[in-house]
Amino acid sequence: MTETPAAAAAVQRVQSDSPWEETMGFARAVAAGDRVLVGGTMPLVGGAVRGEGSPYEQAMLAFGNALAALEKFGLGPESVIRTRMYLSHARDADDVGRAHKELFGAVRPAGTIVVVAGFVDSRVLVEVEVEAFRGAPE
């Protein structure tokens, strides 16, 4: 399917300092219509993994990075309608859940936690995705 110029203009993309975005050819976040999708976001600061050994700190950093991408579209935590949390260890679910509740407890987005085999960097314990709604207010 070929994208028309009008459709291409309706899609907006933002980048972050993740070293993999350029290497792999993806955007941190893509806005299309009333949705903004933030791809897998790790606990990176200045392109380096932070919070090593702390799933709570890594979750806060990863969600912070995802929310920073949403800010570029004028959105905040109140706009988040879905979260996905990928963990390398099931034992970390409570710590990651605590971070999620601190950030989104008032919003209560649809949420998913999945335990995965690992990440591209073995120091990473948590990776997150968020989806936000930027439609007209009710």
Image (cartoon, rainbow, N blue to C red):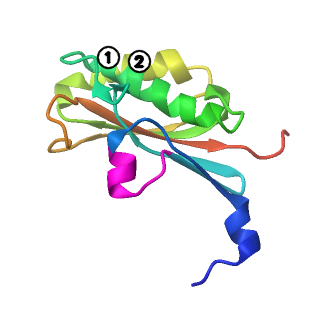
User: Is the C terminus in the top left, top right, bottom left or bottom right quadrant?
Assistant: top right
Q: In the image, which residues are magenta?
A: 20-28
* Residues at marks 1 and 2, CA–CA distance in whole angstroms: 6 Å
Residue drawn where x is 70% and y is 78% of the image? 4
Relative horizontal placement of residue 36, taking residue 65 as reference (left or right)? right
Would you place residue 33 above or below residue 61 in this image?
below
Q: Does the residue at mark 1 contact the one at mark 2 (Cβ under 8 Å)?
A: yes
Bin the neighbour count of mark 2 within 10 Å (Cα to Cα): few under 14, some 14-19, many 20 and up: many
**Helix, strand or loop under label 2:** helix
Q: Examine the structure image and report whether residue 108 is included in the region drawn in magenta.
A: no
List the residue tagged with mark 2: 99
x, y percentage for residue 118?
16, 41
Residue type indicated by callout 2: Ala
Q: Which mark is residue 56?
A: 1
Q: Examine the structure image and report whether residue 24 is included in the region drawn in magenta.
A: yes
x, y percentage for residue 88?
19, 35
Relative horizontal placement of residue 62, taking residue 80 as reference (left or right)? left
